[in-house]
């Protein structure tokens, strides 16, 4: 058995085509993110990747919709992510495929 600490990975991303990674693959990425209530997260989009998100804990707003724990939301390529964290949130993210540099901020 191998043991790892999530804190040892950049931004909670632990599987994908980057280092460090528990599993290095170009097929997908996996992340477990913590966001504090009121945290400002830059608006962004991906050109190549689709993100499958599970809000594990908390409440947030995305695209003027309230998302509560237990909700899965999918962000398609070129769809702008504009999250507002209404409570402390924990999000499990799977992004397909794993393409380094595929995050573009919206000004």
Image (cartoon, helix red, strand yellow):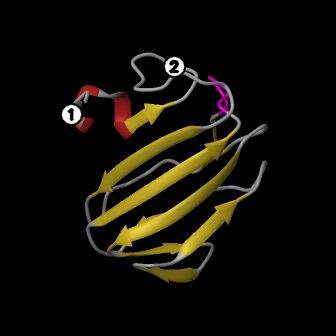
Is residue 100 visible in this depiction of the protein?
Answer: yes
The residue lying toward the viewer, choosing from 102 and 105, is 102
The residue carrying mark 2 is 18
| Quadrant the C terminus occupies | top right
Q: Is residue 98 left or right of residue 14?
A: right
Examine the rendered structure and indicate whether residue 42 appears above or below residue 62: above
**Does residue 105 lie above or below 50 as drawn?**
above
- Decide: is 40 above or below 99: below
Residue ID at (60%, 24%): 25
Is 80 displayed left or right of 89 in the figure? right
Judge from the rendering whether residue 73 lies leftward or rightward of residue 46; answer left or right.
left
**Highlighted magenta segment, given as a residue range:** 98-102
Front in this rendered view, residue 58 or 42: 58
Rendering quarter of residue 92: bottom left
Q: Is residue 82 left or right of residue 47?
A: left
Quarter of the rendering containing residue 8: top left
Residue for point 48% across, 32% down: 15
Q: Is residue 106 visible?
A: no
- Between marks 2 and 1, how big is the CA–CA gap? 17 Å
Residue assigned mark 1: 5
What residue is drawn where x is 66% and y is 64%? 74
Pointer 1: residues within 10 angstroms few (<14), some, or many (20+)? few
Q: Secondary structure at mark 1?
A: loop
Q: Position of residue 17 (x, y in %)?
A: 58, 22
Q: Please tell me whether mark 2 sits on a helix, a strand or a loop.
A: loop
- Across and down, in percent, residue 3 comes to 22, 31
């Amino acid at each position: 058995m191998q043991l790892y600490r999530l804190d040892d990975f950049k931004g909670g991303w632990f599987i994908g085509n980057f280092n460090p990674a528990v599993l290095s693959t170009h097929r997908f990425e996996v992340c477990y993110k913590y966001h504090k209530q009121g945290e400002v997260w830059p608006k962004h989009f991906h050109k190549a990747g689709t993100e499958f998100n599970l809000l594990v804990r908390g409440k947030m707003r995305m695209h003027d919709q309230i998302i509560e724990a237990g909700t899965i939301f999918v962000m398609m390529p070129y769809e702008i992510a504009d999250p507002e964290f209404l409570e402390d949130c924990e999000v499990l993210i799977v992004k397909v495929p794993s393409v380094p540099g595929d995050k573009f901020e919206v000004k």
